[in-house]
Amino acid sequence: MKLVRELLKQKRFQLVLTGLAALAVVLGVLIVPVEQAGGGKLIRSVDDGLWWAVTTVTGVGYGDVYPMTGGGRVVGAILEIVGVLTFGLLVAMIAIAMRRQQERWYWKRLFERLEQIEERIKRIEKHLVWRSAQ
């Protein structure tokens, strides 16, 4: 949950995520009239268009719904290229955030250990000073 909160606070992540969602919705809705005008039979409703857009942008592409017309394929190519690149960017941003979180954990652990070592050294120094005073 901490990772999700950290990601959602980042303006870049918000922008890319919003852009990807907007791209999928716009092209998912736009594909319907393009396919209907060209005689396409698979994408007949906005539901079909949005389903196609989501599966295309994520790279899943089940193949159950796809554009059959030339115009629809142009829209599909745009969505595939821009969508998969943007989706990849989101995955990279998540990986970077995970790595940063892991590094912070290791640095915190390192500094805690250093503090423990410093405390031990201080105790040893006190003990040595006390023994030498006797």
Image (cartoon, grey):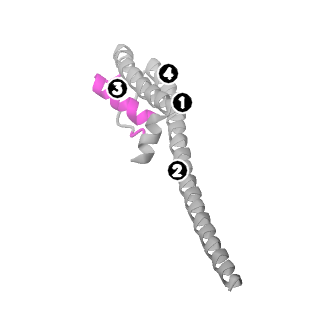
Label 2: which secondary element:
helix
Q: Which residue is mark 2?
A: 101
In this rendering, the answer to whether 51 lies above or below 39 is below
Name the foreground residue: 88 vs 13: 13
The Cα–Cα distance between marks 3 and 4, rounded to whole angstroms, is 14 Å
In the rendered view, does 45 fall on the left or right side of 10? left
Q: Residue at x 42, y 47 (%)?
A: 2
Q: Residue at x 52, y 30 (%)?
A: 12
State the residue lying farthest toward the top: 37
Q: Which residue is mark 1?
A: 81
The Cα–Cα distance between marks 1 and 3, rounded to whole angstroms, is 17 Å
Q: Callout 2: 10 Å neighbours few (<14), some, many (20+)?
A: some
Q: Which residue is mark 3?
A: 49
Number of the front mark, 2 or 1:
2
In this rendering, the answer to whether 36 lies above or below 120 is above
- Specify start and end residues of the magenta stretch as a single range: 40-62
Label 4: which secondary element:
helix
Label 1: which secondary element:
helix
Q: Residue at x 40, y 36 (%)?
A: 55
Q: Callout 4: 10 Å neighbours few (<14), some, many (20+)?
A: few
Q: Which residue is mark 4?
A: 74
Name the foreground residue: 20 vs 63: 20
Q: Residue at x 56, y 50 (%)?
A: 99
Q: Earlier in the sequence, mark 1 or mark 3?
A: 3
In the rendered image, is residue 12 in sight? yes
Q: Amino acid at mark 1?
A: Ile
Label 3: which secondary element:
helix
Residue 22 on image: x %, y %:
41, 24
